[in-house]
Image: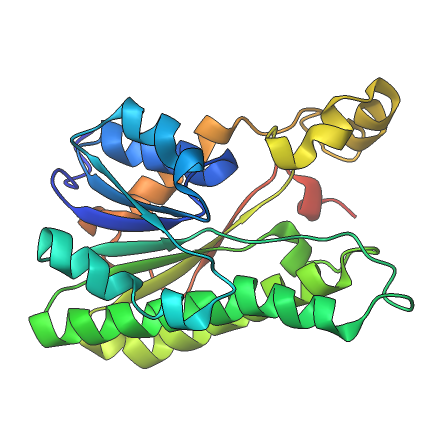
Amino acid sequence: MDLRIKDSVVLVTGASRGLGNAISKYLVDEGAFVVAVARSKSDLDELVLYAPDRVHPIVCDMANKSDVSLLVDKVIDKFECLHAVVNNAGIAPAENFLESDISTMETVLSVNLIAPAVIAKSAANYFITENIKGSIINIASTSGLKGKASLVSYSSSKGALLRFTESLAVEWARHGIRVNAIAPGAFATSAQSAVLENESILTARLKKIPQRRMGDPEEIGPLTAYLVSPLSGFVTGSCFVIDGGEVSKL
């Protein structure tokens, strides 16, 4: 199936590992150019080697708002265009909220909500100026649909990201800009290493998932590419859950 994204330019944050890495590779395989963002260049080296002519790395700390505000301009300087944004970067520190410092929540919100907002606003201004029907995809989490103990700041940030997605979709629809979210459940990435490396913990975790398995990172790529694609032109304000049925059960 031709998704019609060949030579599209897509900005992907948190691209060096996990879901962001898998998304970036799938987009490249579909013929897109990926501007891959991560905190260190060395983390991006493997992705650049995967497709040297299709991946352009940018180093950026998503907690640094001034650096984040320059990302879209850097993409335009390099490619003279931008078609889509995948706001994937995020942090999820475990915490006992009674004992944690409120600065933890401030940092999580800065990375998981404020940075995507800054990027989305910059991208939308460009889309409107250039009359581009752009797509913005926010990678949320099932933790944003259901609160989770020990992840108060993370769950709060992802829940806010979902409401942010819906609000922007309504506000920007008249400009032809689409804004959607993906809410992944448990995927077999380095972020789940503590679970994957402990058989008893893994067994208990899988019992909560109706499909009795974690997601393969490669499974998120096709969905993301579809939302980047003009084939999803009537899709906006939606949240696509990809979790093996976990949040569907009582």
- Residue 31: x and y in percent read 17, 33
Q: Residue furthest top?
A: 199
- Camera sees residue 165: no
Q: Which quadrant would residue 196 be assigned to in this image?
A: top right
- Camera sees residue 238: yes
Q: Which quadrant would residue 136 be assigned to in this image?
A: bottom left
Residue drawn where x is 91% and y is 69% of the image: 98
Residue drawn where x is 50% and y is 30% of the image: 217
Query: Horizontally, is 86 left or right of 77 in the view?
Result: right
Q: Nearer the viewer, residue 147 or 125?
A: 125
Q: Nearer the viewer, residue 114 or 68?
A: 68
- Residue 55: x and y in percent read 24, 36
* 236 to 29, vertically: above or below: below
Please tell me how many numbered marks the rendered image carries.
0
- Residue 88: x and y in percent read 46, 51
Q: Nearer the viewer, residue 56 or 29?
A: 56
Q: Nearer the viewer, residue 105 or 186?
A: 105
Query: Horizontally, is 217 left or right of 125 in the view?
Result: right
The image quadrant where one finds the N terminus is top left
- Residue 46: x and y in percent read 38, 26
Residue drawn where x is 31% and y is 56% of the image: 85
Query: Horizontally, is 108 left or right of 37 in the view?
Result: right
Q: Which color scheme did the rendering employ for the protein?
A: rainbow
* 50 to 44, vertically: above or below: above
* 122 to 223, vertically: above or below: below
Query: Horizontally, is 193 left or right of 182 in the view?
Result: right
